[in-house]
């Protein structure tokens, strides 16, 4: 992959913080500019950090010009649980800002965009098991509605203005490096923290709630592989399904108990249960595997061992 100058928005979130480190190893730290709304004094980053409110188009253009940005990884978004509590802001943040970057690409200010979609684009009418790449999409959340609309906007800009925009539909993402950020699948991060710190966990999802998940290392590698793929491999725009893992809270509990035998779980479902019930329980990602070689490496056993080992070290230092 050739060196390029990159901007990551929402870079202090779960995906951005790890993606930045990976991209620095490829492009060099001075070519990966991260941005978020947090005060620079609060940000521990070995590289260039810019404060950007992605609702401020003028500020975005300033930073792009300042650093001669050519590729944007637009990660800033309001996640599923949080967006349901503030729907109008969720829509504006998730939708208007994507259009800003698509317009910049149309006008040749930038060359390429990565934008994450989500399994939230599916809904209660979607086949739940082994959900196909192309199927019925009836999202029932603000987050899902905005992501589905975003997919169609990306497709429109690609077809009508030849914009190079690439996307994946992320399932739940699991990482020990950054805490959960308000999504419905985030129980699968929080449960590891609670297992180590308290030896017990109260799940906001009920038993038997199977959801597709992906360990963060596999997610980051997928982004890099997709963005480095020859455009001819990708054809017509599609936001690629990514699967990887599928499990319910009790499956994760059983894996944790192999390491922490006295760990216990109880179930107090809240509003996020309805969101989870509207989503797939497993994903068919065969198109991503065929088009650009998506190949996840982590199963539930390897993920659990890695999470617990690293979190024990991290929490001991805290």
Image: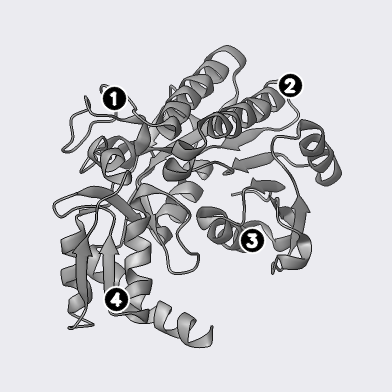
How far is disc 2 from disc 3 in space, using C-alphas? 27 Å
Sooner in the amino-acid sequence: mark 1 or mark 4? 1
Residue 293 appears in which quarter of the rendering?
A: top left
Looking at the picture, does residue 313 appear above or below residue 120?
below
Q: Which residue occupies the foreground of this view, 308 or 2?
A: 308
Badge 1 density bin: few <14, some 14–19, many ≥20, Cα 10 Å: few
Relative depth, front residue between 175 and 295:
175
Instruction: Indicate which label's residue lies in the foreground, 2 or 4.
Output: 4
Residue topped by disc 4 = 305
Q: Earlier in the sequence, mark 2 or mark 4?
A: 2
Image point (76%, 38%), residue name: 60
Q: Secondary structure at mark 4?
A: helix
Spatial separation of the CA atoms under disc 3 and disc 1: 34 Å
Q: Quadrant of residue 165?
A: top right
> Which label was assigned to residue 134?
1
Return the x and y of residue 102 as percentages of the image width and height: 63, 26
Q: Position of residue 149 (x, y in %)?
A: 47, 22
Q: What secondary structure is marked by label 2?
A: loop
Which of labels 3 and 1 is toward the front? 1
Picture quadrant of residue 186? bottom left
Q: Which residue is mark 2?
A: 107
Residue identified by numbered label 3 = 24
* Label whose residue precedes the other's in the sequence (3 or 1): 3
């Amino acid at each position: 992959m050739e060196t390029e100058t990159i901007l990551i928005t929402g870079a202090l979130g779960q995906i951005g913080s790890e993606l930045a480190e990976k991209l620095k190893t490829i492009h060099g730290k001075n070519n990966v500019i991260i941005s978020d709304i947090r005060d620079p004094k609060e940000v521990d980053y070995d590289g260039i950090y810019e404060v950007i409110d992605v609702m401020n188009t003028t500020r975005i253009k300033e930073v792009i010009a300042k650093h001669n940005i050519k590729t944007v990884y637009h990660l800033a978004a309001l996640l599923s649980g949080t967006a349901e509590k503030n729907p109008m802001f969720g829509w504006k943040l998730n939708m208007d800002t994507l259009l800003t970057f698509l317009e910049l690409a149309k006008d040749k200010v930038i060359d390429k965009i990565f934008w994450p979609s989500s399994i939230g684009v599916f809904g209660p009418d979607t086949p739940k098991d082994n959900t196909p790449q192309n199927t019925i999409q009836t999202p029932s959340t603000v987050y899902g509605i905005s992501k589905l609309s975003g997919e169609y906007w990306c497709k429109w800009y690609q077809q009508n203005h030849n914009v190079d925009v690439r996307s994946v539909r992320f399932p739940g993402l699991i990482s020990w490096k950054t805490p959960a950020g308000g999504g419905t699948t985030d129980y699968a991060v929080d449960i590891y923290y609670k297992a180590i710190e308290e030896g017990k966990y109260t799940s906001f999802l009920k038993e038997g709630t199977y959801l597709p998940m992906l360990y963060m290392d596999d997610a980051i590698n997928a982004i890099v592989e997709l963005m480095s793929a020859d455009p001819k491999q990708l054809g017509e725009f599609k936001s690629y399904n990514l699967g990887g893992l599928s499990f319910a809270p009790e499956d994760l509990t059983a894996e944790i108990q192999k390491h922490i035998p006295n760990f216990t779980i109880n179930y107090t479902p809240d509003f996020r249960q309805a969101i989870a019930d509207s989503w797939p329980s497993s994903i068919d990602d065969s198109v991503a595997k065929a088009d650009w070689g998506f190949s996840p490496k982590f199963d539930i056993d390897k993920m659990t061992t890695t999470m617990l080992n690293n979190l024990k070290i991290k929490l001991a230092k805290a």
